[in-house]
Image (cartoon, grey):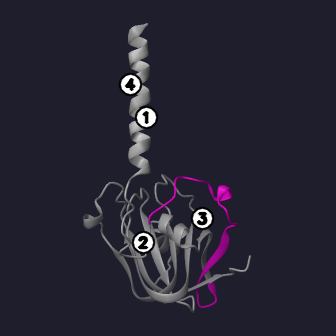
Amino acid sequence: MEDQKRYFLSVVLLLTLIVGVAAFQHPLKERFEVNRSMSHIDMEEANNSPVSTVFLEGNKTLAELQLEKAETREERKNGLMNRRSLDNDSGMLFIWDDSSNRTFWMKNTYIPLDIIFVTAEKTIRAIQEAEPQPNVTEENLELYSSEGPAKYVIETNRNFTDQEGIEKGDKVSFNLSD
């Protein structure tokens, strides 16, 4: 009986220590507008309805995705972090009020991604293929840049743009008023 009490107290002490450390961790300094990500949730569980997004080459539709919106600073900060999978026809649309150079990283991200940087006019400025970096220190993270001003960024499964023939200069169509 005494051994069970000691074991129980050890478990309680360990859990208390873990919760205490988590509560007092210092937040990371924000050096960039970055992609960190939320824990795994399905599209239906997201706080907002998905945005139907179409990729166009001239008048020709190349592909369509259903994207979760990341509009607030906190949503953009979390992005797709800690998710273990992403449906083939889904991703995330990052939205800012202005156009600026955007830099993303893959901190705590487990899914290889295409990061698609889009101008205010909804033209693809750059496409970066990003490797997962779930356990890399901040100093060693690879950075992915928009290579010029971007108002939107789309993240989806890696190789989506190659498979669908989507390239820099193609257009993106979505309606944010939904």
Q: Tell me which amino acid carries mark 2.
A: Val
Which residue is label 4 attached to? 10
Q: Quadrant of the N terminus?
A: top left
Which residue is label 2 attached to? 34
Which of the labelled discs sits on residue 15, or is there none? 1
Q: Tell me which amino acid carries mark 1.
A: Leu
Q: Position of residue 71 (x, y in %)?
A: 59, 74
Which residue is label 3 attached to? 89
Residue 94 forms part of the magenta stretch: no
The boundaries of the magenta stretch are 36-60
Residue 38 forms part of the magenta stretch: yes
Front residue (pair 61, 154): 154
Question: In front of the other: label 3 or label 2?
Answer: 2
Q: Between disc 3 and disc 2, whose residue precedes?
A: 2
Q: Tell me which amino acid carries mark 4.
A: Ser
- Mark 2 and mark 4: span between their CA atoms? 39 Å
